Image (cartoon, rainbow, N blue to C red):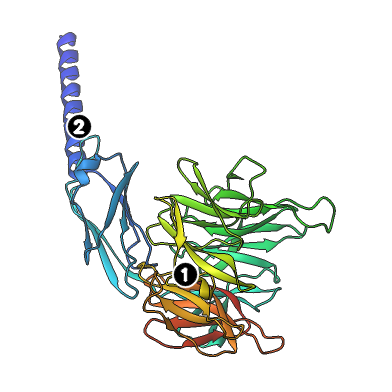
Amino acid sequence: MHSDRFDHFVWVLLAALLAAIVAVVSIGDRVGARVAGIVPADGSQVGPFTKIEVAFGQPMVAASLDGLLKLEPELPGATAWEMDTLRFTPQLPLVSGSSYQVRLLPGARSVAGRMVLRATSSSFTVRDSKVLYLSPANPPHEIFSMDVGADASAGVQLTRTNGAIYDYAVARDGGQVVYSAQNARTGVDLWLIARTGGTPRLLVGCEIDRCIAPEWAPDGRRIAYSRENAGVAPGAAPGAPRLWTVDAETGETAAFNQDMQVLGFDATWSPDGKRLMVYDGSELALRVYEVESGRQQVVQTQMGMVGSWSPDGTRMVITDLKLAQSQALVTLHLIDFERKDVSAAIGPEPESNDYSTPAWSPAGDWLLTAKRLPGSGPNKQLWLMRLDGSEGRALSSDNDYTYDGYRWDAWGTQAVMQRIALREAGALPEVVVWTMGSSAVRLLVADASMARWLP
């Protein structure tokens, strides 16, 4: 009797547990796989190089996501899967002032077999780029930000270091700025600050060494910089620069090349992040590293500076010195890294003119440079030309100024640079902007230098 009751109780309990399990499974099926979020967030303002990410709350079957990520308007680009995140990298910069919508349609399947049951979306707009610069032009100075169409008085101070800024670089997505600033021990540290300012974060504390010339990798994860060991005695000149890199998130840093005889200054990453170039003063040459393989290519130049990458990262225009009729002229040369070839970049008779370091346009169709014609004065005028020198036209004709430090915006429609008056005693650099289609530059800020775009 008691046994029958007990058996009945057990069967009832088992049935209840089975029903509960069925209910949980049923509810789980209705809940489906979880989408943790979309970046950019709904309603946000972003830069033109922003990547689109969809994060999931569980491991997913990558193949099940094919064709489910939709963008309006449609954009060409590349999709990649990393752990639990789907990333879309637009092929071209997003259009300033435009709005975009990202939608993930239902149907993706998790490794556990659950489906994404409902669509998830996010809408965002592309902000206008600002211009960063150092003010005053000579140290001690700080980093300032301003709208390109604003009056010079509208500049906003970004850093507050008591004039300790040495140099800086902007992340490709425009979210952060890395800057080097002198510390209390006469060394130079690396700091990170948000695009809007605020409290900076110490990235690399370099003690009595000098960590300078930072440059962001295109993916925003690593920063290359030059590290100069402190002099052998207080007040002595620092050691030769060597190439280091640092993880922008963790602060983990190390020498890029373990050979202490190899120098490296003025690092620059190729647009695709596959190559990293520095100037090696011990070799009077440019040293180009293939980031994944570590293979190197050395290109001789006496100019002591890197050049301008082609948009696809396979070529670079560099400068070199040539002696012509007892006069030193700066000439332009083209490095083709795929063919391992160096040739004259501008023709015909490229050595008859005196150039400055050029800037290759984002679309790859124009070079912006400064050029001094034979027999002209000491200043170099601003020129726009094709890679072979054709269709060249002067953008300035004022013999009082010379131009350098050109930086294109993301779309190749404007460029910022600095100029200085040669015939004016005590003249200070000025930041100016040129717009495609215009035949003149416009003054942005007087007594300022090192202009950069903040996308």
Q: Left or right: where does residue 265 sit relative to residue 149?
A: right
Residue 455: horizontal and vertical position, in percent?
A: 44, 69
Q: Earlier in the sequence, mark 1 or mark 2?
A: 2
Q: Nearer the viewer, residue 135 or 154?
A: 135
The structure residue drawn at horizontal position 34% and vertical position 66%, both measured from the top left corner, is 93
Q: Quadrant of the N terminus?
A: top left
Nearest to the eye among marks 1 and 2: give it: 1
The amino acid on which the numbered mark 2 sits, given as a three-letter code, is Ala
Whether residue 300 can be seen here = yes
| Disc 1 residue crowd, few under 14, some 14–19, many 20+, Cα 10 Å | many
State the mark number for residue 20: 2
Rendered location of residue 331, percent (x, y): 53, 68
Q: Is residue 318 left or right of residue 428?
A: left
Q: Nearer the viewer, residue 376 or 318?
A: 376
Task: Tell me if I can see residue 204 in this picture.
Answer: no
Q: Residue at x 42, y 88 (%)?
A: 439
Horizontally, residue 437 falls left or right of residue 445, namely left
Q: Amino acid at mark 1?
A: Ala
Measured as percent of width and height from the top left, residue 95 is found at 32, 71
**Image location (x, y in percent) of residue 143:** 60, 72
Report the residue that reaches farthest toward the front.
Answer: 325
Which residue is identified by label 1? 359
